[in-house]
Amino acid sequence: MPVISSQYKPSGIFKNADVSTIFAGKLRKVEHSPYKRERIQISDGDFIDLDWSSSPSGNSKNLIVILHGLAGSTDRPYMRGMARAFNKNNWDAVGMNFRGCSEELNHHYRSYHAGASEDLAEVVSHLLTKQDYDKIALVGFSLGGNMLMKYLGENRSRPGNLIGAIGVSVPCDLAGSLGAINRNRNFLYSKRFEINLKQHLLARAVKFPTKLDKKLVASCKSLRDIDELYTSKAHGFKNADDYYQKNSAINFLEDIQIPVLMINALNDSFLSPGCYPTKIATASKYLHLETPRHGGHVGFVTTSDLYYHEKRAVEFIQSLTN
């Protein structure tokens, strides 16, 4: 599919990448009904918490599955906003909290990472047993967007009623994205991620003292250090470079066989040039790439309660149901 010409035109201050990123991520308030939590046990004995919100009709036959980003959870405004948007269009919504991201440390030493598509596969399989949904779709933000794109392009079985997916601000070139985040202009963002992740790792070190040394955690000075010390090793990769190479969604996009929409803003300072797969999209029957000039990182602010990426996600998925 050719690259889509974006219609997103924010007003005034929201043309600034940092303003839109921070406002949407930290200051936006989303009025939405409380979730109903479901804890599922997965095949290796660990657990994943799912947060449900139903359509007003209460009898929807369609389900949207929503994945959060790095150090996120279903409580983030972007997660609640997307669930609300689909609920209003008669879709049930379920947010997937990755391992260790739902206020309780998961059982195992491993947690989650950008390519943990095996966990997504288990969640999707579980959802098929919950209710006889006619149609299922996926939305992933940032790290969660990379995970879902990898899942869709892998050589694995997927349900026949999975009709499409949307990725928002997808760092599909993980090494390139890390390089972008480590630039001086992103110092405050990267430091915030680093502090958050180190807090999680320190708690994990208390639970697994023979596997993780608190002093080594404290000595990490960057996201790459964390990936080198923990993310790669805990999940079976040789090192950080091996982790980035084997899990970058850019390596799986050509094999996707259902319609997907990727929305990556050109002024997203978290993304590198490799995160804009124009050539792949142009040659693909299924990948639709939209690259608005503005929007920052998951910051597609509008003057209404419905943000631009939410409107586009609903439009795109609804177009596949006709």
Image: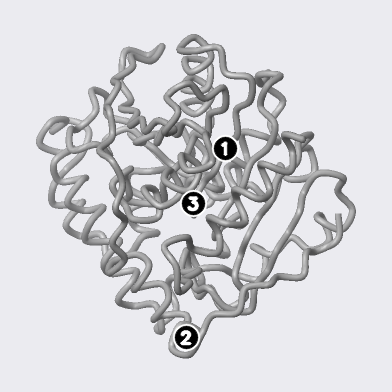
Mark 1 lies on residue: 138
Residue occupying image coordinates x 50% and y 34%: 65
Q: Name the quarter where the N terminus is drawn.
A: bottom right
Asked if residue 93 is positioned above or below residue 172 in the image, the reply reads above
Marks 1 and 2 sit apart, C-alpha to C-alpha, by: 29 Å
How far across and how far down the image is residue 240, in percent? 46, 50
Mark toward the viewer: 1 or 3: 1
314, above or below 210, in the image: below
User: Which numbered dot is residue 16?
Assistant: 2
Residue receiving disc 3: 141
Mark 3 or mark 2: name the one nearer the start of the chain: 2
Judge from the rendering whether residue 185 lies leftward or rightward of residue 6; answer left or right: left
- Position of 294 with respect to 4 (left or right) is left
Q: Amino acid at mark 3?
A: Phe
Three-letter code, disc 2: Asn
| Residue 180 horizontal/vertical position (percent) | 51, 72
Badge 1: residue crowd in 10 Å (few <14, some 14–19, many ≥20): many
Name the N-terminal-most of marks 1 and 2.
Answer: 2
The location of residue 84, given as percent across then percent down, is 42, 46
Q: Secondary structure at mark 3?
A: strand
Q: Residue at x 49, y 51 (%)?
A: 141
In the rendered image, the vertical position of residue 263 relative to residue 182, given as above or below: above
The three-letter code of the residue at mark 1 reads Leu
